[in-house]
Image (cartoon, coloured by chain):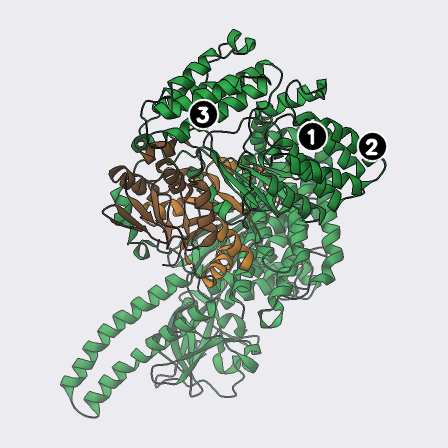
Amino acid sequence: MPFDARKNLLVADTLLSVEDAEVLLEWLLKNPRGRINLSACTHLHTANLQVLMAARPKISVWPTLEPLAEWLKTALDKENKDHAKNDTGR
Amino acid sequence: MNPLLDQFLSEAREFLESISAKLLELERNPDQTGVMDELFRFVHTLKGNSGLFDLPEMTRVLHAGEDLLDAVRDHRLAFSRALADQLLEAMDFVGLLLDEIGAAPDGKVPDTSAHAADAARIGEALRALMATADTAGTTDTATAATAGGQAAAEAAVAAPTDPPAWDASALPEAVRMTLYRALLDGTAHSLLIYEPDHDCFFSGEDPFFQVTQLPPPLWRRLSTAEPWPNLAELDAYHCVLRFELILALSAEELTEHFRYVLDQVQIEPLSIEALLQPSGRVQDQPLATDFIRTALSQINAHDSEALAQAARTLLELSAADLCIASGLRWLLLVLELEPDHQDRQRALLNAIEQQCFGADGALMTASATERATERTTERGPDGIAESSPDRPGSETSTASPSATAISPEVSQSFRQVIEAQRAILTLRDAPEWLSGRLRSVATSLSNAFASLYAASDSDALEQALAMAVEAKDPTPLQDWLAAQPLPIDAQEEPHPLTTPATASAAANATPDPTNTAPKPSAEDQVHFGRRAEDQPSARTLKVDQVKIDRLMNLVGEMVVAKNALPYLAGRAESVHGVRELAREIKGQYSVINRIAEEMQDAMMQVRLLPVSFVFQRFPRLVRDIARKLGKEVDLVLEGESTEADKNIIEALADPLIHILRNSLDHGLEGPEERERLGKPRVGRLRVSAHPLADRVLIEISDDGRGIDPDVIRRKAYEKGVIDEIALERLNDQEAVNLVFAAGFSTAAEVTNLSGRGVGMDVVRNAIARVNGTIDLRSRVGQGTELRLTLPLSMAVTNVMIIESADQRFGIPMDAVVETLRVPRSRIQTIKHHQAAVLRGRLVPLMALNELLALNVEPIANADDELAVVVARMEQEELGIIVDDCRETVDIILKPMVGVVASIPGYAGSALLGDGSVLLVLNPMELL
Amino acid sequence: MPKTILVVDDSATMIMSLKASLEMAGFQVHTASDGVKALETLKGGLKPDLIITDINMPNMGGLELIKNARSLPGMRFMPILALTTESQQAKRDEAKKLGATGWLVKPVGGQDLVKVIKQVLPGA
């Protein structure tokens, strides 16, 4: 398992595979306030990206890999007027 | 040594064999789709393999062949004899190249360019055949469309619903300005819109991975086709993303990168015209009208200095987020970068004039109305997230409604904005940022109404906002909104509006993600660690023949070495007098003997090869010869899976080919002659193989004219093969057997096929060399049949040891009929030839010493009897007088090599258990 | 952990060539000589990170293999590349429709091959 999931903190491994999206989703459902440390992550499959975009969890550490961090910041942009943000912010 | 090249060569030769076999099969019956598919696959694979090496000539020819077969497979072209001819010639050419490559030193791929002209010629010839196919029909394109064009057809259907051309105004002004500079510098930039299929993950795709492999984009936006559902209902495996990127890459580079998903991407080169657009808040600027009028005359006067000055002045007087300010910044940039591009400056002024002012602006024209309408109908998808490296100062760049006239589209989008704000106002949750939310609503409403009614009551709105913020209650704004007039169109057309709230409610109906995307099953996890053991085991092993030969030699030596044990046992008892030990050695010997015999047997099995190894060349051979001779032949092959030792099978090839040639050339009649004779036009040539006890029987028969014994007798006499007496005395069968006599040729004239100075005598000798026999039966007018019997294996030969002139020789037991002692008195001499009547037959006798030119008399035993080995020589028997006959032994016969190889009379040599070398005679060659 | 690739081709030459290129690039390579054998291997529990399959093969061709492999548990999302030649545009489209991720154009080897694989295999 590429996650190191502790209470309310999930530390992602280098690669989050397509199958991992299911696990990630379950973890986020169980830990709605869970934070995610992506520092080691070099790539996550699109399915994981969708989970993150839908759930808008707090990213405690962005990926060290700059291009990936840029993309994720775009995807999970705080300025974004998506309604989902309002929900998670409550 | 180049293992890949070796592999290629050996596999390529197999392919060539199979290809010609399939071609011949198709020639007999062209309607075999399965065979056609296989044939195509062989050529296709061979072509693919040839591409691994630098062999342009071979690849060229094979490619043409592949295309041709593809046309046949698709029924664009009929299979024909001419086509088969052409393809066979092409394969011969490939075979020639293979030989050349195989002969090249050091496993290097030689330069085959010397054959370029031939390759071109053959390729042309193949393509020429196709030309008929291509002219044969527009069906070509039709089939192609059904085969591969379904996607294209679907795309064509989908085309009308494609989104309208992408609007560059979605880009922040700063990004557009950077792009403008880059495009002027000549750097290619493209827009990429990537909307992956919803179920693309199930094709192994990872769109995000494709996107992140691109260089960092100048601008990017990530949006979703639909709003996200509640997390519990999210189907992570239903892809809803839409990527939009602007990259410093050409359309070609992007097309290459996204080659697998071209149906999911839209790639647009960026043009300067699309970028140069003012964007921002629409509001009247009192000075603008004058400015534009003056500016146009300044452009016409090429007075860019003055124009720039005027633009800077007006820019200072305008709020930065206004559309006019944006337009002025653009104008200044164009003046800086392209001061002489008056058309562009004019176009920009035109755009400012048409886009930057409110509804009752004096400059509004009919075309401006249209333009504004278009822009307003552009709606960004929900859930937009975008970023660019240099974020623009203005955050108002997100499209704000700026419509001025009321068309249905405008009113709809207007209502959408209003409804969205109304929905927000109904929220009763009163969060901490309520005031921010209320301000945002007020701004949206102000902009929306300003776009429709320039003289909207903005003061009243301000008041309502102030009240609402103070009361922490949106009611005053709701009241204000309720008091506003709505566009007539909008009221008349109550479209159901998709607000984010309703959309998310609708999305709740999506199925439970755990149903559509089950978790990886436990089984998967368990199997995960078993990879290494799960390798499928290879069922056949290709082994270099040299290795097998070495193994066989070792087994042979083992067999011989174990034969030393009985000698040892004998010595233990007789010399050393230890009987116990002798018995133990004998005991051990029997064990080793059994193992050695099993090893021999196993070895023999390994060396077995089906006769198809030789037979498979026949169809092509027979076809070619028959066509050259103008004969029609149906070749029937039977028992192709019958097996025999590799050496036997290999030794069979040349004699069999010769026999077939003879049958075709001399045996079978031409079609007309056959018809005249009342036979079917098509002759029959049958080659069959059957196992027969420990031998293999091969029969070759034809239904041709047969051999006329009288003709043979006369010919043989004319050629001096027989004398007058024999001419009279020979019965028909004996006469027919004369064809095996040395230097006999039956054909009236020597043809270019079988008349190559090789007669049936050579065939007989070749068969005899592997201890085989040959038997010929023929009936005039009905055909000829040849029966060959061959041992299954040459690996182990049972020989009888004989002594003569103080030397030991071996005679293969296959050839021995009997051994007996003949009293010297019973030997008669007829015309210098010795003979004796044995068991009622007259058997000619010859002394081995005489046959081997050893000038020694045979030694008789005490009773003056001579030892005679009666050997079978084809149909006859010969009594060989020797000094003594001894035991029989199993030996591994090794062919004679070097100088002695050319001496006739010997089959080979073998090593005996006591270490001595035994020369093994070949009785057939002794005479 | 090295990435595992299952190479399916009926030509021993092609297998040898691909295997050499892939192993040189650090991949662990399994091979099968047709679709039937490949399916057996997959059903036997091998879960490669990528499948590369030829199209024209005896017993079971590449298209059928792709279709069948996709229905196996755990193979839903696996990248599959079809080995095609220049002239097989129609086959490529068909392979794609049946669930292939992309295709390779023969002859392919060395750096070109590795480059394509890295494009569909994250972390390779």
Q: Kindly report the distance in space between the C-alpha atoms of the residues bearing marks 1 and 3.
A: 28 Å
Q: Where on the picture, by quarter, is residue B798?
A: bottom left
The residue beneath circle 3 is: B441
Q: How many marks?
A: 3
Q: Callout 1: helix, strand or loop?
A: helix
Quadrant holding the C terminus of chain B: bottom right
How far across and how far down the image is residue B267, in percent?
61, 38
Residue placed most toward the observer, B287 or B453: B287
Judging from the image, mark 1 belongs to the subunit labelled B
Residue placed most toward the observer, B426 or B160: B426
Pointer 1 or 3: first along the chain: 1
Residue placed most toward the observer, B427 or B416: B427
Asked if one can make out residue B130 in the rendered structure from this viewpoint, the answer is no
Dot label at residue B352: 1
Q: Where on the picture, by quarter, is residue B314?
A: top right
Q: Which residue of the protein is positioned furthest toward the bottom in this rendering?
A: B576
Q: Kindly report the distance in space between the C-alpha atoms of the residues bearing marks 2 and 3.
A: 42 Å
Colour used to depict chain A in the structure image: brown
Asked if one can make out residue B566 in the rendered structure from this viewpoint, the answer is yes
B760 is higher (above) or lower (below) than B430: below
Figure chain in green: B
The residue beneath circle 2 is: B297
Q: Which residue of the protein is positioned furthest toward the top in this rendering?
A: B492
Is there a contact, CB below 8 Å, between mark 2 and mark 3?
A: no
Pointer 1 or 2: first along the chain: 2
B436 is higher (above) or lower (below) than B617: above
Q: Which residue of the protein is positioned furthest toward the left in this rendering?
A: B580
Figure chain in orange: C
How far across and how far down the image is residue B23, in percent?
60, 44
Q: Are the residues flagged by discs 1 and 3 from a single subunit?
A: yes
